[in-house]
Image (cartoon, helix red, strand yellow):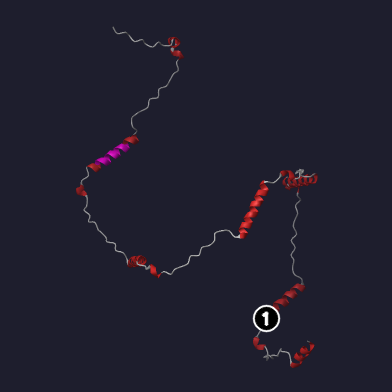
Amino acid sequence: MATKAALPSADPQLLGAISKATPESLHHVQTDVKNPLPSKEVLAEERLRYDHLSSISSFTKVELNPIQPNEKIILPGPQTIAQEKTEQELMSGIEGFDAGKLKPTETQEKNPLPDPSAIEQEKRECEMRHSIGDFNKSKLRHSQTEVKNPLPSTEAINLEKQEVEKIQEIEGFKKDSLKHTEPTVKNVLPDQDTLDAEKKEQELKDGVTNFNRNSLKKTTTEEKNALPSSQDIAEEKAAK
């Protein structure tokens, strides 16, 4: 005879809480019902896609216009042919080059070792590094650090205070306290001496500008020999 399977027992506290629950103790939940139907934009887009596919499926090839393809043969130009010919001649010359025409060359091997001056400099640097690393700090002298006061002195504070007061006085100055002043415009005219001097200067300029070269007298230039005479040469020799 088949036995019944034992069902799992529920928690008594949970069952008691469910039995004591009232509808007023439950929280009200507003169900949000979403419309699964497509919108107008989606329907219009789907309609256009369907019409497009239908027009492609029902399209007849008879409506197409026959087109004869025009095949063009692109031949190289003279410049391209000349360039290819030059490259071909260059490659042929390299392939058929006779290595026996080459001159033997003696290879000069340079000594990559450092010279004595470089060795001496490197030795000094190495000794300097060792001396720095093995330096005994006990040989250092103790120094007392002197802390200076970076604050300004009383004179500097008073001077800055005076400048601030002047700036505040200028900024807060009232224009109403100013007195109205009528400016006196003086007309500075030149005196008689200045007028006479300007007149003479203008007459001199006019005379130079309007000067007639034909009024000049003809003059013969006499060239003098600037070389020393025999007597001067003899006197100079005697002086030496």
Q: Would residue 51 be counted in the magenta stretch?
A: yes
Amino acid type for the residue under numbered disc 1: Val
- Please tell me which residue lies in front, 14 or 201: 14
Vertical placement of residue 90 versus 220, above or below: above
Residue 148 visible in this rendered orientation of the protein: no
Please give the residue where the numbered disc 1 appears in the rendered image. Answer: 208
Q: Is residue 207 magenta?
A: no
Q: Residues within 10 Å of mark 1 (few under 14, many from 20)?
A: few
Q: Looking at the picture, how far across and down is residue 167, in whole percent?
A: 74, 47
Question: Hey, which quadrant is residue 230 in on the image?
Answer: bottom right
Query: What percent of the width, then of the height, locates residue 163?
Result: 76, 47
Query: Which residue appears at 77% of the width and 73% of the height?
Result: 193
From the viewer's perspective, tell me whether residue 75 is left or right of residue 135.
left
Residue 54 quadrant: top left
Tell me the SS state at disc 1.
Answer: helix
Q: Quadrant of residue 225?
A: bottom right
| Furthest-bottom residue in this view | 230
The span picked out in magenta is 44-54
